[in-house]
Amino acid sequence: MKIIIVMENTSNGTCLCEHGFCVYIETEKHKLLVDTGASEKTWENAKKLGIDLSQIDTVILSHGHYDHAGGILSFCEQNSQARIYLHEKAGEDYYSLREEGFTYIGIDKRILQLPNLVFVHNDTDLDEEISIFTHVTEREKWPTSNLRIRKLEHGEYIQDPFEHEQYVIIHQNNKDILISGCAHNGIVNIMNHYKKMYHSYPDIAISGFHMKQKTPFSLEEKQIIQSIGQELLKTGTLFYTGHCTGQEAFILLKEILKDKLIALHAGDIL
């Protein structure tokens, strides 16, 4: 199995980087992408990394935000055959509350008209190698940075409950790899939900943790992140993280998880 980080917020020096996320996975039966970054810059990286987009058979979009789905339309110009899996609620209107007001961060609505789009409603096994799960509703240690993300519903900006988030599991070589775009529903909750389904934790998890914020963490916020680190340490899982985790949170978690936490960069080959 091959895993390549095609787009991330930072680069290992070989690729472009921007606020976005895209992972390429090559299994025995599939060549797939989880997310497509924010723009066509993702495909410039793919070319540098030797990834033939025409050979991709599956694309799974983790949730309905532009930085994860922004590259899909330009991808489809190069590959119109790959099946694209999107949660049925991912096309709703999502906004971020910023200093200048509410800013749209949802997906381009043209994505919803793609002929090769498959809407995901519930937990789904694509085959013996790829599974998708959703409906993570627990709220333990929910990321506080979620509070600024809203859904426009009936003219009101309500708290986004992140029902549109879905997670990918790759089953290969007697190992399970969990991939989440941002873990908006909380990485601890996602891991615990996984354990309820499979009665163990994944061997590897690749995910942003959505802890990044513009202001320094308060003492209470640091303590919450440290407690998350302690919970993750108990799982025995090897974590790769980047994108929306933030450097300050990464340092706090690294002190606890040590070699069980590795930073992601565009161009990394795992």
Image: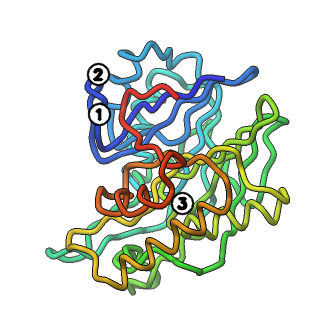
**Tag in front: 3 or 2:** 2
Q: In the displayed structure, does residue 188 sit left or right of residue 142? A: right
Q: Residue at x 40, y 60 (%)?
A: 106
Which quadrant of the view contains residue 192? bottom right
Where does residue 189 sit, x and y in percent of width and height? 63, 70
Type of amino acid at the residue the image marks with label 3 = Ala
Dot placed on the residue nearer the N-terminal end, 3 or 2? 2
User: Which residue corresponds to mark 2?
Assistant: 14
In the rendered structure, are the residues bearing label 1 and label 2 in contact, judged by CB atoms less than 8 Å apart?
yes
* Closer to the camera in the image, 238 or 211: 238
Describe the element under mark 1 as helix, strand or loop: loop
Residue 90 disc label: 3
* Closer to the camera in the image, 18 or 105: 18
> Which residue is farthest left?
100
Q: CA distance from mark 3 to mark 1?
A: 28 Å
Describe the element under mark 3 as helix, strand or loop: loop
Type of amino acid at the residue the image marks with label 1 = Ser
Q: Residue at x 48, y 25 (%)?
A: 269
Where does residue 26 sit, x and y in percent of width and height? 63, 23
| Number of numbered callouts drawn | 3
Q: Residue at x 29, y 21 (%)?
A: 14
**Tag in front: 3 or 1:** 1
Q: Residue at x 22, y 73 (%)?
A: 216
Q: CA distance from mark 3 to mark 2?
A: 32 Å
Q: CA distance from mark 1 to mark 2?
A: 7 Å
User: Which residue corresponds to mark 1?
Assistant: 11
Where does residue 258 sit, x and y in percent of width and height? 48, 51
